[in-house]
Amino acid sequence: MQPRRLTAIDGALALIAILVVAQMWVLTAALDAALGGDDDVALPAFVLSALLCLGSGLLYRFIHRLDRDQRRR
């Protein structure tokens, strides 16, 4: 595998890790707000969590495509 591909995969995996940590933080903050009686946080937290999940999924697709293209060669 070319060093550029490995660098791209490493970068994408680091971004996925950051997005997952951010998603856990959003979940924790939303749960804390909900248990505190603030129900207005639920919808924005859901939207942000969905966007973070989408970003992680797109980065996973990018990694999968790089790996698939390398295996075909």
Image (cartoon, rainbow, N blue to C red):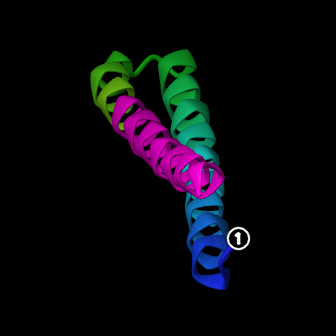
User: Residue 9, located in which quarter of the rendered image?
Assistant: bottom right
SS for dot 1: loop
Magenta residues, start to end: 49-73
Taking 50 as reference, is 69 above or below it?
A: below
Residue that sits furthest to the bottom in the current view = 3
Please indicate, yes or no, whether residue 19 appears anywhere in the rendered image: yes
Identify the residue at image location x=38%, y=36%. Answer: 54
- From the image, tell me which residue sits under label 1: 1
For the N terminus, give its image quadrant: bottom right
Given residues 47 and 44, the one toward you in this image is: 47
Given residues 45 and 41, the one toward you in this image is: 45
Taking 10 as reference, is 7 above or below it?
A: below
- The residue under label 1 is which amino acid type? Met
Please indicate, yes or no, whether residue 22 appears anywhere in the rendered image: no
- How far across and down, in percent of the image, does residue 4 sit? 58, 82
Question: Is residue 70 magenta-colored?
Answer: yes
The answer to whether 55 appears left or right of 34 in the picture is left
User: Residue 58, located in which quarter of the rendered image?
Assistant: top left
